[in-house]
Structures are given as structure tokens and as C-alpha cells.
């Protein structure tokens, strides 16, 4: 972490503090310096400083009421407060309001002003008050957008770091839940925090995480995905090494599983690390459904992963190099549909995949009410037009459509992106070497996955290295009563056993 610069102490002179603040906020037209008076005869001077783009006007209507709400029980009505009373009271007792903070340095005052707080400077006193204000610049808690569920909690995180941590603490009421706050960026001064459950997290993983997160110096961190460059190990791999979520219940489950969560103020996304390969096929809704149904759905997701990755390349290899492996009736049907197509199977698949990716991006960028309609209508029109123009065969349109649908069925969008990249590589291998090329691609992919680590943890765990006890929540989910007492949480139960037995 960067070394802290020398701090400037708040001056006893109100005019001096005003000059310093105005110099720091030069050309900031939304900065308000509001002088006002208090005390007998209103001879005592004070100044309120705030950004009117962050502070509501009704909060600063009457500075006397603000001061009176802080100290009436100690020094009487605000009309009789003197500078010595203010200095003596706050120096010895602190502030009496929970939303107020006592500041001693100019840099602290600047940070609080930028955080949307009201800072009050007093003449003849070398300290200032920071007063929390009402802030309506955030959206309300709503349902998750990226991870909707039919059954289960419908709460989503928002762009406020403190509220997000409060949501998690309301679901996991344990003193072992630890949160640490950091600040990054010289300009944005973005606050972010990481949390873990003491006793559940692997100490080696936590030490590695702290070592990497501490290497952030003056870089601007605007979103949780920015942290992936520091927390990830292999930056050139298409496979995601960290998971993302916007659901507090998913974050709590990850904490109980020994994960470390990271949140950045200004973004609702929670980063879960380490992220292992098979965890990207699980969803929070898996634990709210019947275990047998959940196990079937997980197998379906793995099958969808293989379809999204290998179906176009398999079609290219079979029609180009291994047509003898296709049943005769099916082969004749494929040849009949490809009659008049001027492109080989690889070029045909490449064109249709390009059209599909273009439609997908267009559907994401367009406004939501028309985005889905444009994607569906565009796919139908382009698919039908391509068949009639003899650019693509009906079978190829079906292959591309199935590939796209299979990629949409994966719970984690980051894994879908990895498949989109690898699918084109497998298509090239299939067009050049046929089935052997696909096998080479699968082998190289497996070797690459085996070499990956996420915060020091094997990416393919618990398959490689094999941990039979952890397989209970991999492909086939066992009943939840067994999951709750799994070996990974056994030390938690040991620590709490004595307290649970107490009357």
C-alpha cells in the first residue's frame, strides 16, 4: 500500500481554513461555503462546507439547529453557546450525535466533503465537525437482475457499500464475520472492503489474498472486476478465476464455505474468491429446490457446457472429415440441405456464429423493452434469409441456435464468455484436423485447467486433486441436512458446540 502523505492540521483561524478548502476545490462550482454565527450576540463565527450536488438543501436549512441538536443537553440552547464551550465540550466528550465525527486534519475534512457529508469549521478552534446527511442518490433494494430465482430470497445488493455489508450481516449474525476497509485511487478515493468468516476461511488463502490486495497502490478501482487483475493468477486465460454475485444469500453461503468476499463502493457486484471451475455451474436456487431435481439440473448444465463448446466444431469435423460416422439417412438429409451452399462447413459456421454474436451484443446494448424483441426477430429473419439465400443450411442454423441456447443456460455469465472464445478455437481445430483436432483441443484445455490456481487453490478441485468428501455438493447434491454438517464446516460446529449447550 502507498505511504501516507504528511497531513495538514486544521487551523484555529476560520479564514485560514476557508482559504485552504477553496484552494483544494478550485473551480468546483458545486462547493458551498456557508458562513454563519452563533452564541450571545451572534459574535461567534462558523462555516459549513458541503457539495450541493451531494447534500440535500433541507439538511442545511438552519446551521443553528444542527449545532443545537448536537449539544443542547450539555451547554444549553445554541443561542448561548460560546467558542470556549464548543471547544471544551467536543475536545473532552466527542460528539453527541451518532452521525457526527470530530476531525483534526484538512485531508480528513476533504474526504468527508467528497463523501457527501456536511463539515462545520469553527473560529478559534483547530478541529471540525463532520455531519452525516441524508442521501437519496442511490437506488432502493430490489430483486436481482442477473441472478433471478423462482424460489428463495429476492434481495439484491446496491451501489452503497455500507448497505451491502449490512445486508450480509443481517443474514450472518456472527462475531466471527470480519470486514476490513481499504481505499484506492488518488482521484476517485474509492472505498472497498473485503470480508471473511474467521474459522471457516483457509489461513493460507487469506494470507495470499491480503498479500495481493495490499499490492494495490494508486490505481483507480471503479468496479469489483478491476480487482481481478490483482487477485487472479493467470491473466491470459479465458476461464474466470473469481465468481461474481449480486445476491446477499449467495455471499453468505460463500462465507460459510470459507470464501473471501470483496465489495467496492459504487457497484452492486460482490466478488467471491477463490473461484473454482465446478462452482461456476452452481446457482443459489439449487439449494431452494428438491435435491434430486437439483442434481438433474446440474448434469443438464454440464451437458449444455459441452454443447456450447463443442457442437459447431463436432458438426464441422463430421461433415468435413468423418462423414462415414454419420448414419446414412441423416447424412443424405444433411447433403440435401447443403445442396447449393457455396461455402464449406467451417465458413458456413463462422458466418452464422458471427451473425449470432452480433445479435447477442445488439440485444444487450439496446434498451431493455426492445432489446429482446430485436434479438428474437433478428434471429428469425436472418436465419430464414440465410437459408433462402443459400448462405447457410437449415442444419447449420439449428446447430448455431442450440449452441447459443446452451450458453445461456449457464448460471455464471463469465463462464459463457470463456466458452464464446474457446468455441472459435475448437472450430479452427476441427476444420484443419477433424476429430483429432478436437481431441487435441480438449486435452490442451484439460492440461490448462489443471495448471490453473485461484488464490493458490487448485482450479479443478475437488476433482484434481481428488477429495471424495467434497464431492457431495459437486454433481449430485446430497440432502441439505448432510451439507450443513459437511467436513469443511466441522470446525465451526466444534467452536460453537459449548455455547449451544449453555442455557
Image (spheres, helix red, strand yellow):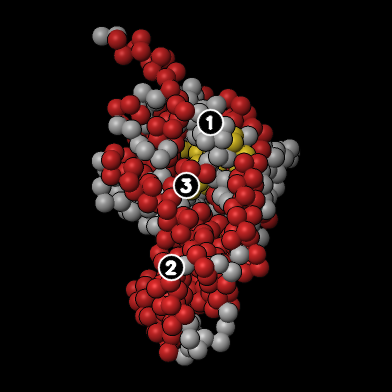
Q: Secondary structure at mark 3?
A: helix
Q: Nearer the viewer, residue 262 or 218?
A: 262
Residue drawn at (65%, 51%), measured in percent from left and top? Answer: 444
Q: Residues within 10 Å of mark 3 (few under 14, many from 20)?
A: many
Cβ atoms under marks 1 and 3 closer than 8 Å = no
Q: Secondary structure at mark 2?
A: loop
Q: CA distance from mark 1 to mark 3?
A: 18 Å
| 1 or 3: mark nearer the eye | 1
Cβ atoms under marks 1 and 2 closer than 8 Å = no
Residue that label 2 marks: 327
Q: CA distance from mark 2 to mark 3?
A: 36 Å
| 1 or 2: mark nearer the eye | 2
Q: Secondary structure at mark 1?
A: loop
Along the polypeptide, which appears first: circle 1 or circle 2?
A: 2
Q: Nearer the viewer, residue 128 or 274?
A: 274
Q: Is residue 502 above or below residue 292?
A: above
Q: Residues within 10 Å of mark 1 (few under 14, many from 20)?
A: few
Residue that label 1 marks: 466
Residue 220 in the image: state x and y as whole percent: 64, 52
Q: Nearer the viewer, residue 366 or 241?
A: 241
Residue that label 3 marks: 280
* Location of the C terminus (image quadrant): top left
Q: Residues within 10 Å of mark 2 (few under 14, many from 20)?
A: few
Amino acid at each position: 500500500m502507498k505511504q501516507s502523505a504528511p497531513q495538514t492540521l486544521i487551523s484555529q483561524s476560520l479564514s485560514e481554513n476557508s482559504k485552504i478548502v477553496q484552494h483544494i476545490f478550485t473551480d468546483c462550482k458545486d462547493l458551498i461555503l456557508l458562513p454563519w454565527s452563533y452564541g450571545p450576540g451572534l459574535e461567534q463565527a462558523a462555516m459549513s462546507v458541503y457539495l450541493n450536488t451531494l447534500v440535500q438543501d433541507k439538511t442545511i436549512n438552519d446551521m443553528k439547529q444542527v449545532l443545537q441538536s448536537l449539544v443542547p443537553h450539555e451547554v444549553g440552547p445554541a443561542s448561548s453557546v460560546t467558542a470556549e464551550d464548543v471547544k471544551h465540550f467536543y475536545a473532552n466528550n466527542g460528539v453527541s450525535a451518532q452521525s457526527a465525527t470530530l476531525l483534526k486534519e484538512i485531508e480528513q475534512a476533504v474526504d468527508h466533503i467528497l463523501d457527501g457529508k456536511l463539515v462545520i469549521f469553527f473560529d478559534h478552534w483547530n478541529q471540525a465537525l463532520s455531519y452525516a446527511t441524508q442521501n437519496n442518490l442511490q437506488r432502493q433494494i430490489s430483486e436481482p437482475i442477473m441472478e433471478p430465482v423462482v424460489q428463495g430470497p429476492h434481495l439484491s445488493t446496491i451501489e452503497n457499500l455500507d448497505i451491502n455489508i449490512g445486508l450480509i450481516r443481517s443474514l450472518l449474525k456472527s462475531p466471527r464475520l470480519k470486514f476490513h476497509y481499504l481505499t484506492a485511487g488518488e482521484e476517485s478515493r474509492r472505498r472497498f472492503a473485503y470480508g471473511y468468516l474467521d474459522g471457516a476461511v483457509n489461513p493460507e488463502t487469506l494470507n495470499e489474498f491480503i498479500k495481493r490486495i495490499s499490492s494495490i497502490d494508486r490505481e483507480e478501482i471503479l468496479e469489483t472486476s478491476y480487482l481481478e487483475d490483482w487477485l487472479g493468477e493467470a491473466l491470459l486465460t479465458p476461464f474466470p478465476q473469481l465468481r461474481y454475485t449480486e445476491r446477499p444469500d449467495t455471499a453468505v453461503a460463500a462465507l460459510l464455505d470459507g470464501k473471501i468476499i470483496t465489495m467496492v463502493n459504487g457497484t452492486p457486484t460482490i466478488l467471491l474468491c477463490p473461484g473454482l471451475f465446478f462452482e461456476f455451474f452452481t446457482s443459489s436456487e439449487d439449494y431452494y429446490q428438491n435435491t434430486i431435481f437439483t442434481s438433474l439440473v446440474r448434469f443438464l448444465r454440464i451437458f449444455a457446457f459441452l454443447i456450447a463448446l463443442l457442437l459447431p466444431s463436432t458438426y464441422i469435423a463430421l461433415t468435413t472429415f468423418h462423414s462415414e460416422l454419420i448414419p446414412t439417412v441423416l447424412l443424405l438429409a444433411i447433403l440435401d440441405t447443403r445442396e447449393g451452399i457455396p461455402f464449406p462447413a467451417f465458413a458456413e459456421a463462422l458466418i452464422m456464429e458471427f451473425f449470432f454474436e452480433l445479435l447477442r451484443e445488439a440485444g444487450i446494448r439496446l434498451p431493455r423493452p426492445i432489446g429482446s424483441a430485436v434479438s428474437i426477430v433478428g434471429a428469425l429473419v436472418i436465419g430464414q434469409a440465410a437459408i433462402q439465400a443459400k448462405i447457410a443450411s437449415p442444419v447449420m442454423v439449428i446447430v448455431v441456435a442450440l449452441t447459443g441456447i446452451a450458453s445461456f443456460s449457464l448460471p455464471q455469465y463469465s463462464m459463457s464468455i470463456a466458452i464464446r472464445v474457446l468455441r472459435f478455437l475448437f472450430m479452427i481445430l476441427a476444420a484443419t484436423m477433424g476429430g483429432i483436432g478436437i481431441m487435441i483441443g480438449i486435452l490442451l484445455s484439460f492440461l490448462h485447467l489443471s495448471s490453473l490456481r485461484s488464490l493458490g487453490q487448485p482450479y479443478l478441485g475437488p476433482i484434481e486433486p481428488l477429495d471424495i468428501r467434497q464431492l457431495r455438493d459437486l454433481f449430485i447434491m446430497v440432502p441439505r441436512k448432510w451439507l450443513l454438517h459437511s467436513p469443511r464446516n466441522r470446525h465451526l460446529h466444534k467452536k460453537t458446540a459449548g455455547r449451544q449447550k449453555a442455557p
